[in-house]
Structure formats: structure tokens, C-alpha cells
Image: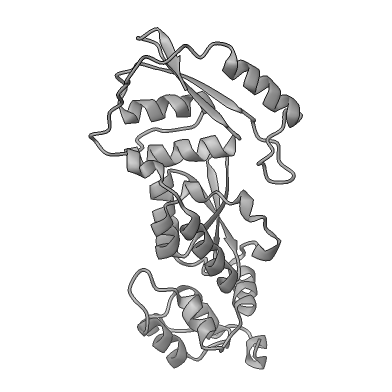
Amino acid sequence: MPAAAKAGPKPLPPATGLVGLARALVQHGHLDEPEARALLQAGGPRDFNFVGQLTGTGRLKPREVAEFASRTFGYPLLDLDAYDPAQLACSAVDAKLMQGRHVLPLYVRRKRLARAVADPTRTDAIDDVKFHTGLMVDTVVVEDDKLQRLIDQAVASAGPSLDALSGDDLHLEFVQEPEPAGEAPADFEDAWLGWHHHLNPGAVAGTRDLHAPVAYVQTPVTAKPKSTCRAVLDFFGADHKNMTLPQLTRAVRASLHDHGTRALLLDFTDRGYSCS
């Protein structure tokens, strides 16, 4: 960091218009006010990545900004190079939201989503993630260049999401009646639990979440997408009060990932058979 950063923060009048991370950097002597204002004016209104713009000038390094943001705003600091990308909960957040708000979902645990950001003062990003996922959000600060690399990888590898199934015209058709599920799901669950010693192989190190290799859900065959999602979330004991359909589908996806579920069994109670 520059030598001027050692001095205490200097007061800035509200009239400067600087807020959040940009204001803090100026107060602590890491940026001049005209510099910060020029960087902010160079970007767009909502999808602008201030940290990326700043580090791109070479004025500060990504590590320096991350350490400053973590120390100043009291959020934990994570080195993404030490994080296993396989643990990322990318299915919990839409790819466009990840790109637009410059956020990376690290994991989902018990109705809380840990998100990695380079700028923890962007409240719009927090609000958008909360709204789209229906989850509480915990913030972790990371280096911008590493964050951008993983976001690009996650977006590139994203396949069709459950959002594609959330239209009002969604319906199910059976070309032929499926055979009853029988004992196969129970046999599979016993075998899977045995292989993994009744632990979730996808859980973050140091945690032991409820492991449900098979989710068994009873629902009428005439059920709509919303009621089907609610039935799945009820199986996991997850809250779904007042959720919209996009929020419900993301919550289902997060619960399946969080509990290591490998098979979802829908029991159509009014037709007398099951379908997985």
C-alpha cells in the first residue's frame, strides 16, 4: 500500500458524492478524490465493477484492495486459489446475476448463502441475490482478478437451469405409464450411504450436513410447478413462504445440492405409481 495509507481516515463531507469502498479508499489515503470520481464516472450505473476498474489502472493490486476491504468493513478474507471450485454453489445463482453483480456463490448451508465479492459495500448486489435465491447472504471478500476468473468459468460451464422450467405453461405428459419405483431407490440410498460412511461427500470440510441421497416426495400428478417445488422443499424442511416461482426453483436446486441428493423420487399419489 502507499505510504499515505498509514495515516488515519480523513473526514469527507457528504457533498462529495463518494460512497462505499471508493469513499473509504479516499479517506484512508489510497486514492485521491478526483481519481476516485473519475473511475466511478467511467463505469455504467449498476453493472459497473469499480474494483476491476481500479486494479486495471495499476494504482492498486487486487490483493491490496481485498485486504483493505476486509480489514475496513470487517468481512472475512478468502484466497480463491485455496478454494475447491467443485464446492461452488453456482446452481444457486443465475449466471447473469453472477456476471452483472460480480458475485460468486461459494456454498449454501441451512438457508444461508456465502457469496464471494471484491466490493462488500455494494448493497444492490446483496439485495438482488437475496431476492433471487430467497436465502440469507453472508459476505466473503476475495481478490477481484481471481473472482472474475471463476465467474467466467462458472458462466461458461453453466448448463440449462431450472429457470427454463418456470414458465406458466409448464406441463407434464406421460407417453406411457412408468413402472413403480419398487425397492430400487432404497437399495441405492443404502449403497450410497455405505460408500460414503453416511456423510455428504460434497460438504465443505469441517461440516456434517444432513445427507439425503434420495429425496422421496409425494405430490398429485396434476400438481403445478409451484406446489411441486414446495413439496420438495417440505421434504428438506426448507422455508418457502411467499416465494415466487423463480425463487422456489432456485431454493429446490440449492437444497438438492446442499444435501447431496442424487435421486429425486416423485410419488404421484393420485395415480397409484411413482416416477423418478
Residue placed furthest toward the right: 197
Which residue is the extreme one toward the left?
A: 169
Picture coordinates of residue 69, whole percent (x, y): 59, 72
Query: Looking at the picture, how far across and down is residue 52, in whole percent?
Result: 50, 77
The residue drawn where x is 45% and y is 39% is 251
Number of numbered discs: 0
Report x, y in % for residue 232.
Answer: 46, 27
Q: Residue at x 27, y 33 (%)?
A: 170
Q: Residue at x 66, y 86 (%)?
A: 1
| Quadrant position of residue 184 | top right
The answer to whether 80 is drawn above or below residue 19 in the figure is above
Which residue is at the front of the view, 50 or 158?
A: 158
- Residue 275 lies, with reference to residue 142, above or below; the image says above
Q: Is residue 79 visible?
A: no
**Depicted 4 relative to depicted 121: above or below:** below
Q: Position of residue 35 (x, y in %)?
A: 46, 91
The reply to whether residue 66 is in sight is yes
Residue situated in front as seen by the camera: 260 or 38: 260
